[in-house]
Each structure stands twice: as structure tokens, then as C-alpha cells.
């Protein structure tokens, strides 16, 4: 047993207009209210006891356009809301970008940085990801830094080398277990229905923790390492049981309350 409280995070990606996004956040909030026996009109202050009634921490990361609505829908529950990306600067001439301070201002507690889709679509390097993660910490957000190898890298036996390089290159200075999370997401497993075996995933997570220990000392023991890539209710339990897998970053299965909740239940909730 370790003292890391698991985190199940939903990455909605570029999905949802106001109607379905609001319904999804509300549906999840209702589930939590049911389990934690909260009244439907619970006040905005969340008692720590309510979080304890759940088997893990919960986070949803809607597209920017839905963050305001999602925050309103989960008020009074321990569900946290996060962004999917942020700019390294706090403000300025960066058309189309969103600063982490803006996410914080909307009520976010987290932001995902360096997702492989952003590394691929927007040519983000480890240095860019590091700058974004540091900006997240500056704004008082927890940064979820994503790493993961491509299929070609896996086939070439480079998984650990690639992931280690990414962790080293994107670790924000000032990272602590409270403001920093790593998500290991093999690129070939994202949205494909394929996953590494639990043992394979555990081996990469253990490698990441060794690298974090080299970089940040014993604090690395407290950092949560999420697995992401085709997590669903049917495979979550065996992955989440691994000693260095402290939760999941869920894409497709986070778009349905029942699926997302099925994954939460892999922790016995
Ligand atoms: P997936 O996506 O669960 O749809 O595979 C995970 C992610 O990209 O975060």
C-alpha cells in the first residue's frame, strides 16, 4: 500500500457542445452526490469528508468552451475541473491561446500539458511542455504532464528511453506531489482499444518513478502516475491494481457517465 490517493481524470478532448457537455458534467455530479449522500442543492463548500466517501479523486477536463458550465455543474461536489492545455505566458499577444491564470480564474484546479495529440498537432517539444507545466504551477494549478512512446518507438525497443527523456525534459521546477502528476500514455494505445499488459504498463511506471527519484528525490514517492490509453471499465481494475499506477487519464470512456463511473468503481467505489 502507498499513500498516493488515486486520481481518475477525464479528458474530453474536442468533444461536446453546451447541451451534452453540461449534461455530462451534471450526470457525473449526480453520481457523486448519490454515492457521497450529498443533497442535490449542496452548498459550494465541499467538506473533506465528502471526498473521503469516494474511492479516488475525480477530475474532468472539458474543452475551454465548456469549463464555465462544467464548474457550475459540479459545484458542491469534490469533482475538480481542469483545462487540456495552456500557454506559458500569463497574458499578452497570443491569439487563440489561454493562460493558466485564466483557467484558475474560471475555477480550474488542474491542466493537462504535453498530451501526445498536442505534441503531434502543434509540434510541442519537451521544452515547451516544461514551460507550460511551470506556468501551470505559477498560476496555482496542478500540472498533468503527459509522456508516451509511439508504436515505432515501442517496436524499436525504445519505450523506456523515450519516456525517460520526456520526463526529464518536461519536469517543471518546483514540482511537488501536490502540484504535479505524470500521465503515461503510449501513443499507440490512445483511442485504439489496445493497451499494454498491466505488467508492461507497471514496468514503465516504475521506470518513471525511478527517473523522478533521480530528479526530485524521495518526493517522487508521492507523485501520482496515471495510465492513459484505451482505459475502459473492463480493463481498468487490472491496470489500476499495479503498484505504480495511481489512476487513469481517460479519453473516449470519459464521455459517458456510466463508462467513466465504471472506471471509478475499479477502486471499489
Ligand atoms: P483514450 O484517450 O482513452 O480515448 O484512449 C486517452 C487520452 O488520450 O488521454
Image (cartoon, grey):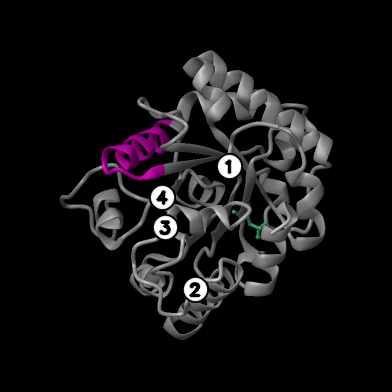
SS for tag 3?
Answer: loop
SS for tag 4?
Answer: strand
Earlier in the chain: of badge 2 and badge 4, it is 2
- Tell me if residue 23 is in the magenta stretch: no
SS for tag 1?
Answer: loop
187 or 70, which lies in front? 70
How far apart are the alpha carbons under marks 3 and 4? 20 Å
Examine the rendered structure and indicate whether residue 48 appears above or below residue 151. Answer: below
Answer whether labels 3 and 4 touch (C-beta < 8 Å): no
- Tell me if residue 137 is in the magenta stretch: yes
Q: How many marks?
A: 4
Q: Is residue 129 left or right of residue 167?
A: left
Query: Residue 60's x, y, as percent?
Result: 50, 61
In the image, which is nearer the foreground, mark 4 or mark 1? 1
Instruction: Check disc 1: other Cα within 10 Å, few if <14, some if 14-19, many if 20+.
Output: few
SS for tag 2?
Answer: helix
Q: Which mark is residue 25?
A: 2
Q: Which residues are magenta?
A: 127-142
Q: Quadrant of residue 231?
A: bottom right
Q: Is mark 4 within 8 Å of ligand 1?
A: no
Query: Residue 247's x, y, as percent?
Result: 64, 46
Label 4 sits on residue: 110
Label 3 sits on residue: 47
Label 1 sits on residue: 5
How far apart are the alpha carbons under marks 1 and 2? 22 Å
Amino acid at each position: 500500500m502507498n499513500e498516493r490517493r488515486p486520481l481518475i481524470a477525464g479528458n474530453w478532448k474536442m468533444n461536446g457542445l453546451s447541451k451534452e457537455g453540461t449534461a455530462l458534467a451534471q450526470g457525473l455530479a449526480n453520481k457523486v452526490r448519490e454515492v457521497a449522500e450529498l443533497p442535490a442543492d449542496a452548498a459550494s463548500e465541499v467538506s473533506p469528508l465528502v471526498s473521503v466517501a469516494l474511492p479516488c479523486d475525480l477530475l474532468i477536463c472539458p474543452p475551454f468552451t465548456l469549463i464555465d458550465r462544467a464548474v457550475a455543474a459540479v459545484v458542491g461536489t469534490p469533482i475538480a475541473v481542469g483545462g487540456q492545455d495552456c500557454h506559458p505566458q500569463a497574458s499578452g499577444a497570443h491569439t487563440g491561446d489561454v493562460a493558466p491564470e485564466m483557467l484558475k480564474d474560471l475555477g480550474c484546479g488542474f491542466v493537462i500539458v504535453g498530451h501526445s495529440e498536442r505534441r503531434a498537432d502543434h509540434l510541442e517539444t519537451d521544452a515547451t511542455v516544461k514551460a507550460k507545466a511551470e506556468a501551470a504551477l505559477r498560476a496555482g494549478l496542478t500540472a498533468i504532464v503527459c509522456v508516451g512512446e509511439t508504436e515505432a518507438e515501442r517496436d524499436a525497443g525504445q519505450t523506456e528511453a523515450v519516456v525517460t527523456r520526456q520526463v526529464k525534459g518536461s519536469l517543471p521546477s518546483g514540482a511537488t506531489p501536490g502540484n504535479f502528476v505524470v500521465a503515461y500514455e503510449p501513443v499507440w494505445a490512445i483511442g485504439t482499444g489496445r493497451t499494454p499488459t498491466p505488467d508492461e504498463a507497471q514496468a514503465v511506471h516504475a521506470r518513471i518513478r525511478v527517473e523522478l527519484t533521480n530528479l526530485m528525490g524521495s518526493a517522487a514517492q508521492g507523485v501520482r502516475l496515471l495510465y492513459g490509453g484505451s482505459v475502459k471499465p473492463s480493463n481498468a481494475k487490472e491496470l489500476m491494481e499495479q503498484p505504480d499506477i495511481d489512476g487513469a487519464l481517460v479519453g473516449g470512456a470519459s464521455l459517458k457517465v456510466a463508462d467513466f463511473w465504471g472506471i471509478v468503481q475499479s477502486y471499489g467505489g
